[in-house]
């Protein structure tokens, strides 16, 4: 009899949790007034290309400047004691 009561309590708690989530979601979903659309035109003048970063050049077939310069030593080889 305890298991039936426990199942009912769990079902009621789960149902009320789902209901609470639905109510919170519905209450928070409100449409707000949108600002009126306006068009603005701006003009900018540049004096020429000005690089912001000095990145290495990537050329097809050339060396990869992003590859590491340090090469790790090879892993040690281990022999199994039974392989003789």
Image: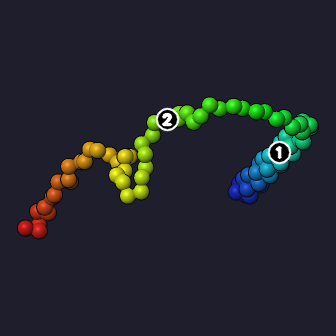
**Count of marks placed on residues:** 2
Tell me which residue sits at (20%, 53%) in the image.
74
Question: Which residue is the site of mark 1?
Answer: 25
Q: CA distance from mark 2 to mark 1?
A: 46 Å
Tell which residue pokes out farthest to the front in this image. Answer: 47
Q: Tag 2's secondary structure? A: loop
Q: Quadrant of the C terminus?
A: bottom left
Q: Tag 1's secondary structure? A: helix
Q: Quadrant of the N terminus?
A: bottom right
Whether 56 is drawn above or below 80: the answer is: above
- The percent coordinates of residue 29 (x first, y second) are 86, 43
Contact? badges 2 and 1 (CB < 8 Å): no
Tell me which residue sits at (55%, 33%) in the image.
50
Structural crowding at the residue carrying mark 2, measured as other residues with C-alpha within 10 Å and reported as few (<14), some (14–19) or many (≥20): few
Res. 22 in view = yes
- Circle nearer the viewer, 2 or 1: 2
Tell me which residue sits at (11%, 68%) in the image.
83
Tell me which residue sits at (89%, 36%) in the image.
38
Image quadrant assignment for residue 78? bottom left
Position of residue 38 in the picture relative to residue 65 (left or right): right
Question: Which residue is the site of mark 2?
Answer: 53
- The percent coordinates of residue 16 (x first, y second) are 81, 48
- The percent coordinates of residue 37 (x first, y second) are 89, 39
């Amino acid at each position: 009899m305890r298991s039936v009561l426990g199942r009912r309590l769990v079902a009621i708690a789960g149902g009320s949790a789902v209901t609470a989530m639905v109510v919170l979601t519905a209450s928070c979903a409100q449409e707000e007034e949108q600002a009126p659309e306006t068009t603005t035109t701006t003009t900018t003048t540049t004096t020429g290309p000005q690089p912001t970063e000095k990145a290495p050049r990537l050329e097809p077939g050339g060396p990869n400047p992003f590859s590491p310069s340090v090469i790790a030593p090879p892993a040690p080889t281990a022999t199994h004691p039974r392989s003789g």
